[in-house]
Image: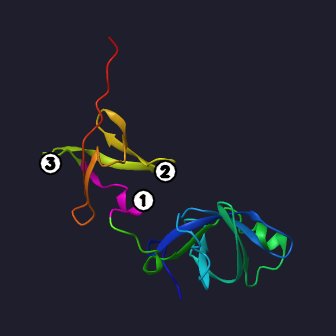
Protein backbone atom coordinates (compact mmCIF):
# COMPACT_ATOMS: atom_id res chain seq x y z
CA UNK A 1 0.00 0.00 0.00
CA UNK A 2 1.35 3.43 -0.90
CA UNK A 3 1.42 5.87 2.00
CA UNK A 4 2.14 9.61 2.07
CA UNK A 5 4.43 11.12 4.71
CA UNK A 6 1.54 13.02 6.33
CA UNK A 7 -0.34 9.73 6.84
CA UNK A 8 2.47 8.24 8.94
CA UNK A 9 3.56 8.46 12.57
CA UNK A 10 7.21 8.06 13.50
CA UNK A 11 7.98 5.37 16.08
CA UNK A 12 11.75 5.11 15.65
CA UNK A 13 14.85 5.82 13.65
CA UNK A 14 17.36 3.36 12.21
CA UNK A 15 20.55 3.88 14.20
CA UNK A 16 22.94 1.45 12.51
CA UNK A 17 23.43 -2.10 11.29
CA UNK A 18 23.23 -4.68 14.08
CA UNK A 19 24.95 -7.93 13.12
CA UNK A 20 26.09 -9.18 9.73
CA UNK A 21 22.90 -10.58 8.18
CA UNK A 22 21.07 -7.30 7.52
CA UNK A 23 19.69 -6.62 10.98
CA UNK A 24 19.36 -3.01 12.16
CA UNK A 25 19.21 -1.31 15.54
CA UNK A 26 16.33 1.16 15.84
CA UNK A 27 16.27 4.03 18.35
CA UNK A 28 12.78 4.33 19.74
CA UNK A 29 10.85 7.58 19.48
CA UNK A 30 7.80 5.96 21.03
CA UNK A 31 7.42 5.34 24.73
CA UNK A 32 4.94 2.49 24.24
CA UNK A 33 6.57 -0.69 25.58
CA UNK A 34 6.74 -3.52 23.04
CA UNK A 35 5.55 -1.24 20.23
CA UNK A 36 7.35 -3.34 17.59
CA UNK A 37 6.29 -6.75 18.94
CA UNK A 38 3.15 -7.27 16.85
CA UNK A 39 3.95 -5.22 13.76
CA UNK A 40 3.95 -7.01 10.41
CA UNK A 41 5.99 -4.23 8.90
CA UNK A 42 6.88 -0.54 8.95
CA UNK A 43 7.52 2.28 6.50
CA UNK A 44 11.04 3.67 6.14
CA UNK A 45 11.78 7.10 4.70
CA UNK A 46 14.20 10.01 5.03
CA UNK A 47 11.52 12.62 5.73
CA UNK A 48 11.37 13.69 2.08
CA UNK A 49 11.27 10.55 -0.06
CA UNK A 50 8.32 8.27 -0.74
CA UNK A 51 7.97 5.88 2.23
CA UNK A 52 8.80 2.23 1.47
CA UNK A 53 7.15 -0.67 3.31
CA UNK A 54 9.45 -3.28 4.87
CA UNK A 55 8.10 -6.55 6.28
CA UNK A 56 9.50 -7.48 9.70
CA UNK A 57 10.88 -11.01 10.06
CA UNK A 58 11.76 -10.73 13.76
CA UNK A 59 12.24 -8.20 16.57
CA UNK A 60 14.50 -8.30 19.61
CA UNK A 61 13.79 -5.77 22.36
CA UNK A 62 16.92 -4.02 23.68
CA UNK A 63 17.33 -1.33 26.31
CA UNK A 64 15.88 1.89 24.75
CA UNK A 65 16.01 0.29 21.28
CA UNK A 66 15.03 -2.72 19.21
CA UNK A 67 16.94 -4.91 16.80
CA UNK A 68 14.93 -5.75 13.69
CA UNK A 69 15.43 -8.07 10.74
CA UNK A 70 13.64 -6.80 7.62
CA UNK A 71 12.71 -9.13 4.78
CA UNK A 72 15.00 -8.54 1.79
CA UNK A 73 17.79 -6.83 3.77
CA UNK A 74 20.40 -9.58 3.99
CA UNK A 75 23.79 -7.94 4.55
CA UNK A 76 25.33 -5.29 6.77
CA UNK A 77 25.97 -3.24 3.61
CA UNK A 78 22.26 -3.24 2.77
CA UNK A 79 21.45 -2.42 6.40
CA UNK A 80 23.93 0.49 6.30
CA UNK A 81 21.84 2.05 3.49
CA UNK A 82 18.95 2.32 5.99
CA UNK A 83 20.95 4.29 8.56
CA UNK A 84 19.08 7.39 9.90
CA UNK A 85 15.86 6.44 8.08
CA UNK A 86 12.68 7.28 9.98
CA UNK A 87 10.62 4.25 10.99
CA UNK A 88 6.88 4.91 10.77
CA UNK A 89 3.46 3.29 10.89
CA UNK A 90 0.16 4.52 9.46
CA UNK A 91 -1.54 7.05 11.72
CA UNK A 92 -4.47 4.64 12.01
CA UNK A 93 -2.11 2.20 13.80
CA UNK A 94 -0.79 4.61 16.41
CA UNK A 95 -0.94 3.28 19.95
CA UNK A 96 -4.01 4.23 22.00
CA UNK A 97 -3.54 6.79 24.77
CA UNK A 98 -5.14 7.09 28.16
CA UNK A 99 -7.02 10.22 29.20
CA UNK A 100 -4.68 13.18 29.68
CA UNK A 101 -2.00 11.74 27.37
CA UNK A 102 -1.18 13.32 24.01
CA UNK A 103 1.10 12.66 21.11
CA UNK A 104 3.79 15.33 20.98
CA UNK A 105 3.27 15.93 17.26
CA UNK A 106 -0.41 16.71 17.98
CA UNK A 107 0.66 19.48 20.39
CA UNK A 108 3.27 21.23 18.25
CA UNK A 109 2.02 24.54 16.77
CA UNK A 110 -1.05 24.72 19.01
CA UNK A 111 -1.95 28.25 20.13
CA UNK A 112 -1.06 28.91 23.76
CA UNK A 113 -3.44 31.16 25.70
CA UNK A 114 -3.75 32.24 29.33
CA UNK A 115 -6.78 31.48 31.48
CA UNK A 116 -8.49 34.67 30.25
CA UNK A 117 -8.09 33.54 26.62
CA UNK A 118 -5.32 36.05 25.77
CA UNK A 119 -2.83 34.68 23.26
CA UNK A 120 0.63 33.99 24.67
CA UNK A 121 2.21 32.30 21.65
CA UNK A 122 2.57 28.88 20.01
CA UNK A 123 3.90 25.61 21.34
CA UNK A 124 7.23 25.26 19.58
CA UNK A 125 8.81 22.12 21.13
CA UNK A 126 8.27 19.53 23.81
CA UNK A 127 11.28 18.27 25.73
CA UNK A 128 10.78 14.91 27.39
CA UNK A 129 12.19 14.85 30.90
CA UNK A 130 12.55 12.18 33.55
CA UNK A 131 10.00 13.73 35.91
CA UNK A 132 7.80 15.58 33.40
CA UNK A 133 7.89 17.16 29.97
CA UNK A 134 8.80 20.80 29.33
CA UNK A 135 6.88 22.92 26.83
CA UNK A 136 8.80 25.54 24.85
CA UNK A 137 6.38 28.32 24.00
CA UNK A 138 7.35 30.77 21.26
CA UNK A 139 6.29 34.27 22.40
CA UNK A 140 6.96 37.73 20.96
CA UNK A 141 9.53 38.21 23.77
CA UNK A 142 11.27 34.93 22.88
CA UNK A 143 10.96 31.31 23.96
CA UNK A 144 9.54 30.50 27.40
CA UNK A 145 9.94 27.11 29.07
CA UNK A 146 6.91 25.81 30.97
CA UNK A 147 6.77 22.58 33.00
CA UNK A 148 4.02 20.36 31.58
CA UNK A 149 2.34 19.81 34.95
CA UNK A 150 -1.21 20.59 36.12
CA UNK A 151 0.02 23.62 38.10
CA UNK A 152 0.79 25.38 34.78
CA UNK A 153 -1.10 23.45 32.08
CA UNK A 154 -4.84 23.79 32.65
CA UNK A 155 -6.33 22.48 29.43
CA UNK A 156 -5.27 20.88 26.17
CA UNK A 157 -7.93 21.33 23.50
CA UNK A 158 -6.88 19.46 20.35
CA UNK A 159 -10.15 20.21 18.56
CA UNK A 160 -9.89 23.94 19.32
CA UNK A 161 -6.11 23.76 18.61
CA UNK A 162 -5.10 25.49 21.86
CA UNK A 163 -3.44 24.97 25.21
CA UNK A 164 -4.52 26.99 28.24
CA UNK A 165 -1.66 27.57 30.64
CA UNK A 166 -0.14 29.87 33.21
CA UNK A 167 3.40 31.05 32.64
CA UNK A 168 5.78 30.47 35.54
CA UNK A 169 6.67 33.59 37.49
CA UNK A 170 10.39 34.18 37.65
CA UNK A 171 11.78 35.67 40.81
CA UNK A 172 14.01 38.64 40.20
CA UNK A 173 17.30 39.15 42.00
CA UNK A 174 17.20 41.83 44.67
Label 3 with label 1: CB-CB less than 8 Å: no
Mark 2 or mark 3, whichever is nearer to me? 2
Q: How many residues crowd around disc 3 within 10 Å: few (fewer than 14), some, or many (20 or more)?
A: few
Which of the 4 quarters of the picture holds residue 49? bottom right
The image's colour scheme reads: rainbow
**125 falls in the magenta region:** no
Q: Secondary structure at mark 3?
A: loop
Q: Nearer the viewer, residue 131 or 40?
A: 131
Q: Which mark is residue 149?
A: none
Extreme residue in the right direction: 20
The residue carrying mark 1 is 104
Label 1 with label 2: CB-CB less than 8 Å: yes
Residue 171 vertical position relative to residue 99 in the rendered view, above or below: above
The residue carrying mark 2 is 128
Q: Which residues are magenta?
A: 100-112
Q: How many residues crowd around disc 1 within 10 Å: few (fewer than 14), some, or many (20 or more)?
A: few
Q: Earlier in the sequence, mark 2 or mark 3?
A: 3
Label 2 and label 3: CA atoms lie apart by 27 Å
> What residue appears at the point 12 percent right and 45 percent down from the top-left corner?
116
Extreme residue in the left direction: 116
Q: Nearer the viewer, residue 63 or 13?
A: 63
In the displayed structure image, the side of residue 39 where residue 104 appears, left or right:
left
Q: Secondary structure at mark 2?
A: loop
Q: Nearer the viewer, residue 10 or 77?
A: 10
Which of the 4 quarters of the picture holds residue 172? top left
Amino acid sequence: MIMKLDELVEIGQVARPWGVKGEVKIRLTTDVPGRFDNLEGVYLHDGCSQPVFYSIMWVKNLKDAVAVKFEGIDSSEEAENLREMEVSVPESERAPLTEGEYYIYDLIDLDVVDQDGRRIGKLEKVYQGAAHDIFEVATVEGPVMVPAVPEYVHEVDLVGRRIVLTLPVLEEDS
